[in-house]
Amino acid sequence: MQKRGISESFKVKQAILLSATEAAEMILRVDEIITCAPRRREDRM
């Protein structure tokens, strides 16, 4: 594959896929934190 110059393209796609996976994981973590956080309510009466 290196003879045809495909190795660089594969490495770039692999890095993009890894970055996208990490971003999706972070979004899910933040979403979980937001949904699990207790709401603070103040009585105004």
Image: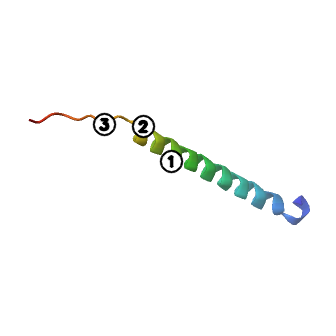
Camera-nearest residue between 10 and 2: 10
Residue name at image x 42 percent, y 37 percent: 36
Find residue 27 and name its label: 1
Residue drawn at x 41%, y 42% as measured from the top left? 35
Mark 1 and mark 3 lie on one chain; the one further toward the N terminus is 1
Callout 2 crowding tier (Cα within 10 Å): few <14, some 14–19, many ≥20: few
Q: Amino acid at mark 3?
A: Arg
Nearest the eye: 40 or 14: 40
Instruction: State the image coordinates of residue 32 (x, y, percent, origin top left).
Output: 47, 41
- Secondary structure beneath label 1: helix
Q: Position of residue 7 (x, y in %)?
A: 82, 58
Q: How is the image coloured?
A: rainbow
- Residue 27 x, y percent position in the rendering: 50, 47
Disc 1, disc 3: CB below 8 Å?
no
**What residue is disc 2 on?**
36
The residue at the far bottom in this view is: 4
Distance between the Cα atoms at labels 3 and 2?
A: 9 Å
Q: Nearer the viewer, mark 1 or mark 3?
A: 3
The structure residue drawn at horizontal position 76% and vertical position 61%, both measured from the top left corner, is 9
In which quadrant of the rendered image does the C terminus lie?
top left
Q: Is residue 37 above or below residue 23?
A: above
Rounded to the nearest whole Å, what is the CA distance between mark 2 and mark 1?
A: 14 Å
Q: Amino acid at mark 2?
A: Cys
Residue 4 lies, in percent from the top left, at 88, 65
User: Given the image, on which type of amino acid does mark 1 rest?
Assistant: Ile
Q: Which residue position holds label 3?
A: 39
Q: Residue 18 versus residue 5: which sits nearer the camera?
A: 18
Alpha carbons under labels 1 and 3: distance apart: 20 Å
Callout 3 touching callout 2 (CB < 8 Å): no
